[in-house]
Image: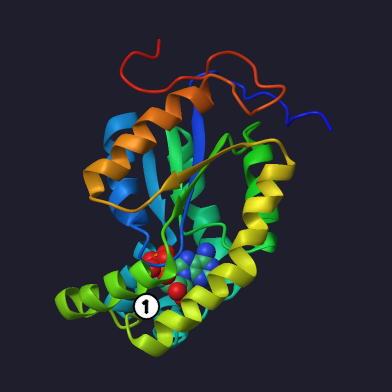
Amino acid sequence: MVGPPPQDTATRLIGIIFGPPGSGKGTQAARIEAEFKLKHLSTGEILRAEVARGTPIGKEAGRIMAAGDLVPDELIVDIVRGRLPEAEAGAGVLLDGFPRTLRQAQALDAMLAEEGHRVDLVIALEVPEADLIERLLRRAEVEGRADDTRKAITERMHEYHKLTEAVLDHYARQGVALERIDGTGTPDQVFDRIRKAVPSSLAGEGAPGRKGPGRVGADAS
Ligand code: ADP
């Protein structure tokens, strides 16, 4: 199979950061956003803000999230559809927590295709499950997130393995550059690994059919 069609511009990057609950996605996404000047779009953060504001979306999503289940695809796709165009207008986008199901991935691909874009890079953080549970229970004591209970954590891990790994396969089959990053250690160590991995993926390794260097960042011109 031939790779996906080239982007309309060599410098725009559409990336996705994947990882099971507690893998440090949010922490690393914030660093990637700052270093690579990407717009960070976290569906979990957007939903938590809706819950906090008590909006109709928040009311629908709040209970589902607290149980560790996924909110309906239509709701989440509508949220992303409303925010993606503005995010796409910049140097690039880093999606965090989306797409989480095959249907969401297909909806995302269609939205991006309307603008002549596609997913260029997938970063997958990998952390052993025992470490994840320990991190989440520790976070529960500090932040008190409603879904950081042992029961909801188990459900979120289950959802991740059941649905989200299919999304990884979906992009791997398309020939999108997939960087598996060891997510153990300190946030600095993990970010260092990401920093080393990202430019080489953008340089075209592992992405057949890619056009141009496609680098992003301060030196992209
Ligand atoms: P985590 O990876 O720690 O579970 P997130 O902040 O990404 O945290 O998501 C928290 C919760 O928000 C999820 O358990 C789910 O209920 C909901 N959620 C976030 N993104 C999506 C999505 N793309 N599809 C369905 N539900 C989502």
The residue at 34%/67% (across/down) is: 131
The answer to whether residue 65 of the structure is visible from this angle is no
Q: Few, some or many C-alpha atoms within 10 Å of disc 1 (few <14, some 14-19, many ≥20)?
A: few
Q: Quadrant of residue 149?
A: bottom left
The residue sitting at 59% across, 75% down in the picture is: 72
Answer yes or no: is residue 159 visible.
yes
Q: Residue furthest left?
A: 142
Using residue 170 as the reference point, say whether residue 25 is left or right of it: left
Q: Residue at x 46, y 64 (%)?
A: 20
In what quadrant of the picture does the C terminus appear? Answer: top left
Q: Is residue 205 above or below residue 167?
A: above
Which x, y percent locates residue 191?
30, 40
Q: Position of residue 116 (x, y in %)?
A: 66, 31
Which sits in the foreground, 53 or 131? 131
The spot of residue 177 in percent (x, y) is 59, 34
Instruction: Left or right? Give the position of 46 relative to 79.
Output: left
Going by the numbered disc 1, the residue's amino acid type is Thr
Judge by depth and name the residue closer to the eye, 92 or 211. 211
Residue closest to the eye, 50 or 136: 136
Disc 1 Cβ-to-ligand 1 distance below 8 Å: no
Left or right of 170: which side holds 40? left
Q: Is residue 48 above or below residue 7?
A: below
- Image quadrant assignment for residue 172: top right
Q: Which residue is mark 1?
A: 55
Q: How many marks?
A: 1
Quarter of the N terminus within the rendering: top right
Dot 1 lies on which element? loop
Q: Position of residue 58 (x, y in %)?
A: 39, 78
